Structures are given as structure tokens and as C-alpha cells.
């Protein structure tokens, strides 16, 4: 079911904006105030679970680290497995890597090479708390495909739409966000 405007406003107001974190000029969207409110947290997970209950998803894939907070309960609600994508050097077994450019330098994310091996042609749903430039999501979707699954959609609680991340995602898969927020 679609969230009403008042439900969206309630979620929006449950997210704390922290100016100049982690550096000057960034408006950090702090979702710990949302997850700390059981009504808001449940509203988000229930909404995603309803959206994907008939989507024949085999795995939910979450990006470190806030993608884990939403991805794990969603996987449980859908009755499917959860696969983590982590920063370089954190996963213990054989990994596949993907680098992506930042304003200065680059980041690298990894997935276990056998993450989807239990299901042939697995269908995966990617989730993160927020999309900004889309660099993290794009690299993560590439990893999902390299590991042998099909990413059927990438979903987010918050889309900072002025930064254009949705367009980057749409080059690879379908895009969904609950809240669209202007600016950084
Ligand atoms: P990007 O790769 O630019 O789309 O950035 C998305 C990742 O960085 C996500 O994992 C977010 O959790 C985090 N992130 C980027 N910008 C913000 C922001 N303004 N507030 C909170 N998290 C952010």
C-alpha cells in the first residue's frame, strides 16, 4: 500500500538532520532517530515488505552499514536470505570487488563470491538507507550481478534527489525510494 502524505511527513520528521557532519557543508540525515522510534521503524519495514512480498525475491542485499539495519529485518519479513556488501577487507572468505570514484580518491566494496550460490539465477533486492550520488548503489548492483544474481530493484528510505543518484541506478535496474528530499 502507498504511504499517505501524513505517514511520509511522520517519517521525515523522525529523521534528524545534522549539519556539517562528517564535514562542513554536508547535511547528514541521521536515521538512528527513525530506527529508535518503533512506530517509524515498523512503518518502513512493513512498507518495503508489502511492496516486495510478491516480487519473487530470493535475497535482500544490504550495503554497509546502514543498509544492514533495514535489510536484515526486511529479509526476515520476506522469508529470504540476507547478503551483506562490505567495505574492502571486512569479508573473510573469497570476495569480488568493485571500486568507485569519490570526490577525492575512491572507495571499494566487496561481496562473497558464493553469496547467491544456493539459488540458481537468484533474484536480489538491493537496499540502503540513503542514496546521494549513487556511487555506492551502482558499485553494489554491479557486485550483485558479478556474483551471479539479478538485481531486480534498488530501494532506499531517502533519496537526496538533487545529487542525481536515481539516474545512476536506473542505468542498471529499477529504482524506488520512500522519501525524496531536496538538497544535500
Ligand atoms: P552515494 O554513494 O553518494 O549515493 O552515498 C550513499 C552512501 O553514503 C549511503 O550509504 C549513505 O548512508 C551515505 N550518505 C551519503 N550522503 C549522506 C547524507 N547526507 N546523510 C547520511 N548519509 C549519507
Image: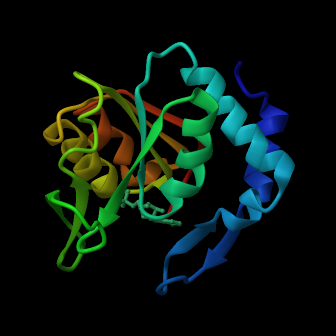
Q: Relative to residue 11, is residue 66 drawn left or right?
A: left
Q: Relative to residue 96, is residue 102 drawn left or right?
A: right
- Residue 155: x and y in percent read 47, 38
Q: Nearer the viewer, residue 96 or 18?
A: 96
Q: Is residue 142 above or below residue 19?
A: above
Q: Relative to residue 50, is residue 3 drawn left or right?
A: right
Q: Is residue 184 above or below residue 148?
A: below
Q: Relative to residue 107, is residue 58 drawn left or right?
A: right
- The quadrant of the rendered image in which ligand 1 is seen is bottom left
- Residue 9: x and y in percent read 79, 44
State the quadrant of the N terminus.
top right
Res. 163 image quadrant: bottom left
Q: Is residue 87 above or below residue 55?
A: below
Q: Residue at x 21, y 44 (%)?
A: 114
Q: Nearer the viewer, residue 72 or 28?
A: 72
Q: Residue at x 58, y 56 (%)?
A: 69
- Residue 103: x and y in percent read 24, 74
- Residue 28: x and y in percent read 57, 71
Q: How is the image coloured?
A: rainbow
Q: Residue at x 79, y 62 (%)?
A: 36
Amino acid at each position: 500500500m502507498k504511504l499517505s502524505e501524513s505517514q511520509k511527513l511522520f517519517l521525515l520528521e523522525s529523521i534528524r538532520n545534522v549539519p556539517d557532519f562528517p564535514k562542513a557543508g554536508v547535511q547528514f540525515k541521521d536515521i538512528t532517530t527513525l530506527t529508535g522510534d518503533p512506530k517509524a521503524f515498523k512503518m518502513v519495514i512493513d512498507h518495503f515488505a508489502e511492496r516486495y512480498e510478491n516480487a519473487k525475491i530470493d535475497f535482500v542485499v544490504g550495503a554497509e552499514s546502514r543498509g544492514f539495519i533495514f535489510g536484515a529485518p526486511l529479509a526476515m519479513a520476506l522469508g529470504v536470505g540476507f547478503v551483506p556488501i562490505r567495505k574492502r577487507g571486512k569479508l573473510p572468505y573469497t570476495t569480488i570487488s568493485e571500486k568507485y570514484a569519490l570526490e577525492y580518491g575512491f572507495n571499494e566494496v566487496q561481496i562473497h563470491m558464493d553469496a547467491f550460490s544456493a539459488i540458481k539465477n537468484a533474484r536480489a533486492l538491493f537496499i540502503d538507507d540513503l542514496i546521494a550520488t549513487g556511487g555506492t548503489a551502482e558499485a553494489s548492483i554491479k557486485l550483485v550481478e558479478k556474483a551471479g544474481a539479478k538485481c531486480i530493484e534498488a530501494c532506499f528510505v531517502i533519496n537526496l534527489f538533487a545529487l542525481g543518484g536515481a539516474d545512476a541506478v536506473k542505468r542498471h535496474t529499477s529504482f524506488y525510494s520512500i522519501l525524496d528530499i531536496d538538497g544535500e
